Image (tube, helix red, strand yellow):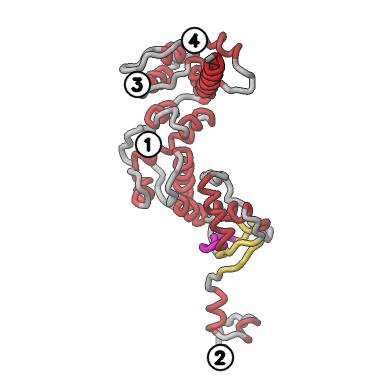
Amino acid sequence: MEKNYQKMPLPKLDDLFTTEEERKNDKLEKVVDIDLSLIDDFPNHPFKVTNNEEMKRITNSIKENGVLSPVLVRKKQNGRYEMISGHRRKMASELANKTNIPCIIRKLTDEEATVIMVDSNMQREHILPSERAFAYKMKLDAMKRQGFRNDLTSDQVGEKLTSVDKLSNDSEDSKSQIQRYIRLTNLISPLLEMVDKGQIAFSPAVEISFISKEAQKWLFNSIERNQSTPSLSQAQEIKGLSKDDLLSIDKIDDILSREKPNQVEKLKIEMRSLKSKMPKSVPMTQYKEYIFKALDYYNRHLQRNNSRER
């Protein structure tokens, strides 16, 4: 009688000449030095890495003590590496004229890498609204690909945000607040930059995010012309007109030119005449700062002349 024998896989060559303990050690994560030039930034990294005072502090620390906490990377198919956590340490190392950086190499899927990248950067002390907005969106999209529900509603308040339950549990923001942040990713860059600078408040910005990109450009140009940003009620009015297909450049100008309640009296100067006196290199958004600096310079000039006359 013929017997059926299950074919056993042949042992690998490495298994024949290494102990089980050695094989286990090979799988453990180790800290290795990697050339900085071989490490690429995470694609569409939502957190800004700038050479500011904080960066100078990190750079000086690395010059004196080296990188004390290894960065986290993963291998790419082309032999290079992708940064998961440690973009600021990488930039500071480059500024400190270092060639290598200590790294932990971890095998991660795209979704796992995105979640870790967002979570590790959310520990920063200062996070801009735009950074939080795109980070939440990236993590939510990654969670969706991993199998979590993605039933975001379009209402600001949020009714049944089951898709962000886990995201909310992992963050300091509520489900509805996370949705409001994600709405900011629909803003055009100039308006989003104004939100980051605190020139447009968060709630009006969320309302503005519902209007078309073209209407947002009208709004930005109107803000520059009127030197006035929309209040919450004005943003809601603009959103309502847009929803009814009644929004126009003139109507936006009319809304922003209205005096707001409790508004401090302002000096109104025709933009055309002001623009003719300003250097072309100065953008409209910096007119106010330029005028105050010019006045300071003029006053110091007057004081010097008065002191000479005495």
> Is residue 72 highlighted in magenta?
yes
- Nearer the N terminus, badge 2 or badge 1? 2
Residue 157 visible in the snapshot: yes
Highlighted magenta segment, given as a residue range: 66-74
Give the side of residue 3 with respect to residue 245, left or right: right
Give the side of residue 100 with respect to residue 48, left or right: right
Q: Which mark is residue 153?
A: 1
Amino acid at circle 4: Ile
Residue shown at 56% from the left, 52% from the top: 87
Asked if labels 3 and 2 touch by Cβ distance under 8 angstroms, the answer is: no
Cα–Cα gap, marks 2 and 3: 89 Å
Residue shown at 54% from the left, 55% from the top: 86
Secondary element under disc 4, as helix, strand or loop, is loop
Cα–Cα gap, marks 4 and 1: 43 Å
Q: Is residue 152 above or below residue 71?
A: above
Q: Which residue is mark 2?
A: 1
Secondary element under disc 1, as helix, strand or loop, is loop
Cα–Cα gap, marks 2 and 1: 68 Å
Q: Which mark is residue 239?
A: none
Secondary element under disc 2, as helix, strand or loop, is loop
Q: Which mark is residue 269?
A: 4
Q: Quadrant of residue 18?
A: bottom right
- Nearer the N terminus, badge 2 or badge 4? 2
